[in-house]
Amino acid sequence: MERGLVVPAITVEHLSKSYGDTVAVRDVSFEVQKGEVFALLGPNGAGKTTTVEILEGFRNRTGGTVQTLGVDPSDHITQRWLRTRIGVVLQELAIEPYYSVRQVLSRNAGYYPNPRPIDEVIELIGLREKADERIKKLSGGQQRRLDVGLGIIGNPELLFLDEPTTGLDPAGRRDTWDLIKRLSSAGTTVLLTTHYMDEVEALAHRVAVLFGQEIVASGTPSSIGGRDLGAATIRFRLPEGVALGELPMTAEPGTDDHVVIHTEDELRVLHELTGWALDGGHALAGLSVLRESLEDVYLGLTRSDA
Amino acid sequence: MSAAVEVPEKGSFRGLSDLPLVARQVQYEQLSFWLNPIGALMTIAFSVVFLILLGATAGTSTVSSYGHIKLIDYYVAGFCGYGVMAACFTILAITLVNRREMGLLKRLRLSPLPTWMAMAAILVNAMIVAALGVILLLVVGRLGYSVHGPAHWLPFAVTLIVAMLCYSALGLGMSTLVPNADAAGPMVSLTFFILVALSGLWFPIAPGSGLATFADYFPIRHLINALVASFTGQPGTPLWPWRDLGVMAIWGVAGVIVGLRRWSWSPKRG
C-alpha cells in the first residue's frame, strides 16, 4: 500500500467467520470513517464481539477482507504498529485488583509511543480523588471508568468500545458519553457495541444492526430501517368544548385526555390541524409528532420471526 | 464525513526499545506480587516453615539412602526444590489461570506489548520469587541449624535454574488444563502435593524401591536428588547430575508443548 493514501478508519468487505460448522459472522460489510462514532447493534450471539475482535486483530477471519487503519489486522508484520494506535475497552472488566489507579495507568502508558498524560486520563475518567486507591477498593462503576481510561491511555486514533457503559449508574453513563463525545470531537474514531438505544442516539453518527450473523440494516440512528419515512403519530390534548368528530381529520382517543392521529403525510395534516386551530381560536396543548423509536425499529429488525 | 486516515508505509514500523520494556514489565510483575502480601508470604514462607518444623525434629539423624548425609542437610536442599516448584509451578499456573479468566491475558494480547515480553516478565518474576525463597532457606539453614552448603555452588545454581525453567514450563502447561478460576487452586495444589509426596521430600525414598522407580518418571525426585548431591558434595556422586537435569529438561519441553497447543488468551470458563 502506498504512503499517504487516504482510506477509511475501518473497511470490512464480505467478512465471514466460522468455528467449525458454526457460523459466527456471515458476509458482513461496512465502513467507518475517521472521527466517526459507529455503533454495532444486535442481540447476544449476533456476532458483534467476533466482528470487533477480528477488527482488533485478536481473532482471524475465515473469509472476506478487513482493514483497520489501513492495514490487515491479522498481518503480524503490522500488528504491533496497529496496537499502538488502537484502544480497546473489553465487554467484561479486566483490571488487576492490587495496583492503584495511577500504577495501572502508568504501566499501560509505557506500552505506547505517545501516551496521554496519566493525570489527564485520571481527570477525564473522573477518578482524581481515587488516583492512589487500590483498584479492588473501587466501586464497580469506578472500575469500569478505569477500564475506559486504560482504553484511551495510548492516545488511540481508533477506539473499540464493547458495551462500555454496562454496569454504570446513570451519572457514570452520562460522564462516559461526554468523554466519548470529546474524543470524537478531537478526531478519535469510535466503534461502539451496545444494547442501549439511547446511547446510540446520543453518540453514534451511524449504526448497523447485526442479526443472524449478518447486517440486516444500517444508516444513521434517525433513518435506519426507514425510521424517517414511516408513519408518524400526531398527539395533542383535545381542546375544551370540542368533540372528537369536530376535528378536521380522523382522530382516535389516546391516553391522558390526548387524541392521536396516525398519518404518513404529517406535513399536510399538521398544516390543516394548525390552520383549523388558529381559525377557531383553539389551543392544541401538548402537540407533538412522534415517529417509531430506535428501539421499535431495532426490535422489528431483530424479531426471530422477522 | 470525509475519509482521512494516513496509511503507514509498509515496514515503517520500528517498534519500541524492547529490553527496557521487559525490565519495566518485570518491575510491575514484582509490584503486583508484593502488593498481595498474604499471597507473597504463603509462597515463600511455606517452605521455610516446613524446614523449621522438620529441622527441629531432625536432630542428628542421617539419611541412609543418601550415604548417611545429615537429615537437616537433606531438608535444606530438598526444600530449596520445594520452594522453586511452589513459585514456578503452583503460583505461575494459578496466576495464569486467574489472569486468563479475568480477561487480563486478552487485554495484554490487545496491547502493543509483544507476547514474548509479557510471558518473559511473568517467568522472570516467578524465578525471582523462587530465588528469594532459596536464599531465605539457605540463611535459615545456616543460622538455625548450622548447615553449611552448598558444597558445589555452580552445579547447585545450574540445577536451580534448570528447575525454574522446567517447572515454569510445567506451570504454563498445567494452566491450560485448568478449565476455570475456581478449579485452579484445587487442581494445581493437588498435583503439586502428589508430586511432592513422590519426591521423597517428607520421607526419603530408598533408591531401587518400587516407589523410587515409579517416582523416577517424574521430575521432582530428580530435582531433589540433584540438589542434595550438589548441596552435600557427598563423595562418590558425580559433580554434574546430567541425568536428573535431562529428565527435568524433557518434562519442561513437554510442558511447553502442552502449553502452546492448548493456550488461550480468552477466558475458558469451562
Image (spheres, coloured by chain):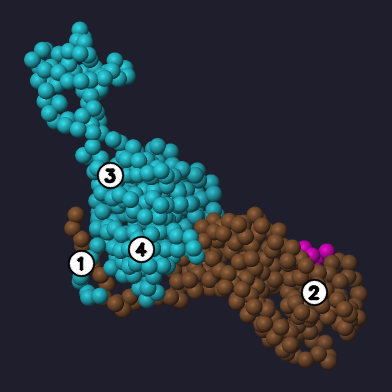
Chain colours: A cyan, B brown
Residue at (40% x, 59% y) in the render: A25
Residue A61: percent from the left, percent from the top? Answer: 40, 66
Q: Are marks 3 and 4 in contact (CB under 8 Å)?
A: no
The residue identified by callout 3 is A225
Res A255 → quadrant:
top left
* Start-end of magenta stretch: B49-53
Q: Amino acid at mark 3?
A: Gly
| Residue extending farthest front | A305
Q: Nearer the viewer, residue A52 or A110?
A: A52
In the displayed structure, does residue B136 sit left or right of residue A9?
A: right
Q: Which mark is residue A15?
A: 4
| Label 4 residue SS | strand
Q: On what subunit does the disc labeled 1 rest?
A: A
The residue identified by callout 2 is B199
Q: Which mark is residue A6?
A: 1
Quadrant containing the N terminus of chain B in the rendered view? bottom left
